[in-house]
Image (cartoon, rainbow, N blue to C red):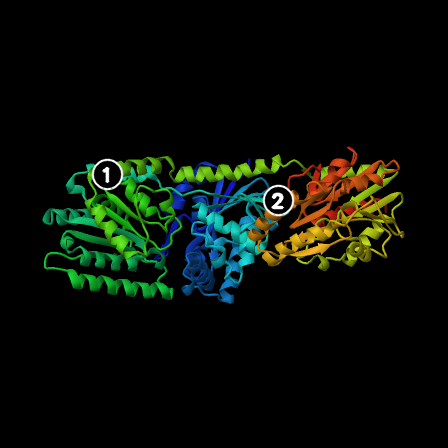
Amino acid sequence: MGKTIIISNRLPLQINISDKKLEVTPSVGGLATGLKSFHEEGDSIWIGWTGLAAEEIPEEMADAVVEKAANEGCVPVSLTTEEIEKFYYGFSNRTIWPLFHYFMEYTEFQPDHWEAYKTVNEKYAEVVVARLNDGDTVWVHDYQLLLLPDLIRQKKPNVTIGFFNHIPFPSSEVFRTLPWREEILKGMLGADLIGFHTYDYERHFLRSVNRILRHDIDFNSVNIGDRIIRTDSFPMGIDYKKFRKAAKEHQNQPRSENTDVQKKLDYHKYVTRNTKLILSIDRLDYTKGIANRIRAFGYFLEKYPEYKEKVRLIMLAVPSRTNVPQYQLLKKEVDELVGRINGQFATVNWTPIWYFYRSMPFENLIDLYCSSEVAMITPTRDGMNLVAKEYIATRTDNTGVLILSEMAGAAHELNEALIINPNNFEQIVDTLKQALEMPKQEQVRRNKILQKRLKRYNVEKWAKDFMKSLKDTKKTRKAFKAIELTPNIKKDLFDRYSAAQRRVLFLDYDGTLRSFEEKPEDAPPDQELINLIKRLGEQENTRVVIISGRDKETIGSWWKDVPVELIAEHGVWVRNVHKDWKLTENMNNSWMKTVRPVLETFVDRTPGTFIEEKNYSLAWHYRKAGPELGEVRANELSAVLRDMISNHGLNVQQGHKVLEIKNSGINKGKAANKLLTEKYDFIFAAGDDWTDEFLFTELPEQTTTVKVGMNKTAAKYYLKTTDKVRRLLSEFIELTH
């Protein structure tokens, strides 16, 4: 069994160098806690940045940093000051962070920041690949490393890769404003499983993939041709036992052992016995809605003046990204708002807001959680928000009220909290009044439900669920019906090919020999393909047939000078080498004048679609239409046509982004079988879409059938791409030389 490699922007360590002394202590963040069991108990390494610039580590201490990290099962990635500035403070926190949180006015699109982001992701990839073996499992974390899954996949295609996005994923309309949107999506799609906190974020990602990269989506899976990527939502929990235990110890400890913070809180409650505390804890970030929360509290005191000297807002704002301009401006705004409200409402004995701009030790957080009757968490956009969960976990007597923004990922789980719109001041102040007046019985009822849920789905359960789903992606690959044409299978295939006295190869064109283009007319065979087919057909006792849904004029003109047999329009027309086209059946196309107006109506209603008229069929293409609208219209048109043509000897075939109406009884399998008038000891057929399934099912049992791409199929084998098909055909040629 392979090892697990965890990769995040930062290592789960705090590394400090002072007076040439090195100190390394474990981090206590949610991610470090959640993955602790995997990291410590299994065969695992953790790769990430130390938190120090390369220039901050004395040369003589560099090896000691690596050694200390190794003792903790960690491998450091070295970043220069310039890389940190452009990659972390630049692209990660001035482009991705604001864009993904819908703060487009703060979003910067700096090409040099993007180049640094790519460079650093490549640097991480080098460190990972150097320690990676086939059979290992990789788990990449968060928005700083969106390119990393694909960079690893390119070097190590057989490893299992998971990616978890810890922040929101924006709607496709917002995401598409990013100049490097395709690169970001392709980077993420290097993973086998992509996780999000909520289904909404997952849905936004899938829609972006569908609209921007035009990949097909099947429920929560993305088919990119050679791989199928799963997505799912895994709401991150907290270390419930840790917070619960700390709160109980806090409750039971003697007063003499209380922290200074707790003593001051107790004194406040003793002096002002009827005053209730409202808690607000956040990083100082514009996504947290801190300024709006302060304004709403000021409005609350105006609207409900009876609460003056009866409530106090405790605001803990933890410094964050202090060298980013927007954060500096936010700090100034918050300072001014706190000063204005305290100046407006304070009395000799009462200050409305206690404001702390610093981080606090864990025990002081427990003091605040346990002492506050209300927690007000109102971000304007937040991936999850674990503070809300921590507050509920510490309420040992089940009292306390949580006011939570509907824009936080946690709101999807914590339905028993008082859910508010963070931009609706009236709702916020009225909900705050409701929280302050909520009967204890109601508080207990709500919190018991919340605590039961948080205890069950804690941070370890989150990590285990993700890893189980990641392992299940291996089973999904194994359950795929067709078998990949591996080197061992190819060896047997080549032996049979070499020994055969008579061979015939049926080759689909679009999606098999040639990749798809937006416009069908833009996909003629390149010279390399023409030479390949010529050489294949020149082999002794080898018959090559290109079998396509294309009209005979197009396919015929493309291959007019090549000695190859052609079957066009899914089996309607056949052209032997250097012969004229012949109909395979008596055909009738009088129906086309009735059906065409229906197709024209759908073209008018669906931008980007068009009609292709063949001799005996009509095709409605929707490859250039908006993906969602195209699928909706295709389903609608299919139903209309099936009802319309049910008694006229016609059928509707669904191809790759195309609906084709043609005579019943005509298909590629039937047409191919008609050419098998002699005995062949090697029959080969390759195709990529639904119309090629007739080849796979109707040709003789001994046929070697190959599907291009990873879709459900009746074929025995599959190859991932058109390039691999061409390579296989080249290898057939090499066998006879």
Q: Residues within 10 Å of mark 2 (few under 14, many from 20)?
A: few
Q: Quadrant of the N terminus?
A: top right
Image spot of residue 145 (x, y percent): 49, 53
Report if residue 344 is visible in the image: yes
Report if residue 606 is visible in the image: no
Q: Callout 2, which amino acid?
A: Ala
Above or below — where is 236 with respect to 173?
A: above
Residue hosting label 2: 639
Q: Nearer the viewer, residue 111 or 705?
A: 705
Above or below — where is 604 with respect to 660?
A: below
In-image side of 631 versus 20 (left or right): right
Which of the two discs, 1 and 2, sits closer to the camera? Answer: 2
SS class, disc 2: helix
Residue 504, by quadrant, is top right
Q: Residues within 10 Å of mark 1 (few under 14, many from 20)?
A: few
Q: Nearer the viewer, residue 603 or 197?
A: 603
Image spot of residue 230 (x, y percent): 54, 43
Q: Residue at x 62, y 46 (%)?
A: 640
In-image side of 11 versus 642 (left or right): left
In-image side of 274 versus 656 (left or right): left
Q: Nearer the viewer, residue 304 or 386?
A: 304
Image spot of residue 193 (x, y percent): 52, 44
Residue 286, by quadrant, is bottom left
Residue hosting label 1: 442
Q: Callout 1, which amino acid?
A: Glu
Q: Nearer the viewer, residue 446 or 166?
A: 446
Disc 1 and disc 2: Cα gap in Å?
A: 53 Å
Numbered mark located on residue 400 in the image: none
Q: Residue at x 79, y 34 (%)?
A: 700
